[in-house]
Image (cartoon, helix red, strand yellow):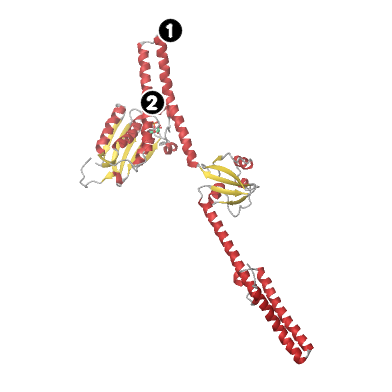
Amino acid sequence: MLSLPMPALWSYLLRRLLLVAVPSLLLALMAGLTAGLCLLVALITVLLALHLRNLWRLTYWLRQPKPETVPEARGPWGDAFVALFRLQRKAEHGAELLREALNRFQDAGAALPDGVVIMDSDDRIEWCNPLAEEHLGIELPRDRGQQLTYLLRQPHFVDWVTGESYERPLTLRNARNEGRTLMFRMVRYGSREKLVVSRDITLLDRAERVRRDFVANVSHELRTPITVISGFLETLEDSASGADGEALDEQSVKRAISLMRSQAARMQQLVEELLTLSRLESDAAPAPAEKFQVRALIELLGRETETLSAGRHRVMVRIEDDTTLLGSRSELHSAFGNLASNAVRYTPEGGEVELIWREVDGQGVFTVRDSGIGIAPEHIPRLTERFYRVDKSRSRETGGTGLGLAIVQHVLTRHQGRLEIESTPGRGSRFSAILPPERLKLSGRGDGEG
Ligand code: ADP
């Protein structure tokens, strides 16, 4: 606080008085009253001028007050200037603290995993964090003061903002970017200010859709066999009870039982593949590194393919390298078997199916080549999706579930491998399962065979 100690003030006044009065009195005694008075006026004028000068310096400084340019003076003016200097320093320190607090707040806002927009009572943007800039297409400082609904004009969003729906969050698909899903929440604070919080829920939304599609697909797949079986059971029941007139002859009963068995087998196949898929999906760890000979596995697959084909195709097996693999034999058996059985199922009678194993640039490559119906290019990227089929009826007729290639993909991913598909409609396909060098046991290490 600015305070000049009273004794200091009195002594200052006394000194000034003496400085003015003593010389004037002496001159009056020596040269007469007029001369003394003239000197008094002159000295008072000098004092006044000095005060006016300091007053002017103060006024000049106040136009641009900075601690480093505070004027210097002696006496009460000096004390006043020192006090001003301290006051200014304190104000600057306060402003610095405020700036730091604001920066910290903005850093925290930038680090938030959600977008945040602060709006005034007229829905005009006051501030937002970088994530909100990205979600809503805001660009600060250009858009400060802009209406939020001017930047994102989708009718749903505009209705939601203007409708002041504080409890109801809004989910917006394809908001600004194709394929992106955003969820918005609105919070009210202060007198009428609003906070809009945005969150990218694209992955969550996609997972939810996949789950819904999956449940719908499984139900759909199970419905047909269940309908067929319950239809036959009803007919058999009616015929046994004699409700519907004539009893079924032995031939028809045999046929009905055989059809029911094939439908039950279809359901069993579906359930088994679903369980395999769920087991593969729930195990996040890489596949175990059991050591086994590929030759034996491919030869076994060759025999299984022959059985499946039942003489309708020319089945060939070509093993170019005697590789020892480090992986899950049962999983790879199932994956390679799926590729081989697909080749048989999608190749008309008289066609060729070839199973090939070889090492290419240190990688292990299992290829199934067929001369079958082939696949149009637009389907190829989607084949490993669960239940994706090019021709649904052909897949079902041949006992397919639409899960085979999804299983293959999972098994290969668990072995850090990949699936490559080449196909020409009407001419045939090549499915190659590629295993990385670390899954191949280098020969000559002397570990023996597993
Ligand atoms: P599915 O049980 O229906 O065969 P998959 O997941 O094994 O299911 O295969 C998905 C789809 O890929 C099949 O429905 C079929 O349309 C196509 N497909 C797979 N392998 C072949 C092949 N070798 N030749 C032609 N189409 C194939």
Measured as percent of width and height from the top left, residue 68 is found at: 59, 71
Q: Earlier in the sequence, mark 1 or mark 2?
A: 1
The quadrant in which the N terminus is found is bottom right
Q: Residue at x 37, y 31 (%)?
A: 273
Number of labelled discs? 2
- x 28%, y 30%: residue: 304
* Amino acid, disc 2: Met
Is 305 placed left or right of 188 in the picture? left
Q: In which quarter of the image is ligand 1?
A: top left
Q: Where 302 sits versus 261, above or below?
A: below
Q: Name the residue under label 2.
A: 267
Q: In this view, does 303 lie to the left or right of 223?
A: left
Q: Kindly tell me whether residue 331 is visible in this rendering.
A: yes
Q: Quadrant of the C terminus?
A: top left
Where disc 1 sits, the SS reads loop
The answer to which quarter of the image holds residue 267 is top left
Q: Which residue lies furthest to the bottom in this view?
A: 30
Q: Nearer the viewer, residue 422 or 212?
A: 212
Inter-mark Cα distance, 1 to 2: 32 Å
Is label 2 in a helix, a strand or a loop? helix
**Label 2 CA crowd tier, 10 Å (few <14, some 14–19, many 20+):** some
Q: Position of residue 66 (x, y in %)?
A: 61, 69
Question: Disc 1 marks which amino acid?
Answer: Gly
Residue 97 horizontal/vertical position (percent): 56, 60
Compared to residue 211, the image places residue 223 above or below, namely: above
Residue most extreme to the front: 7
Q: Residue 414 carries which label?
A: none
On whether ligand 1 comes within 8 Å of the CB at mark 1, the answer is no
Q: Which of 52 and 65 is in front in this view?
A: 52
Residue 372 appears in the figure: no
- x, y percent for residue 193: 63, 48
The residue carrying mark 1 is 245
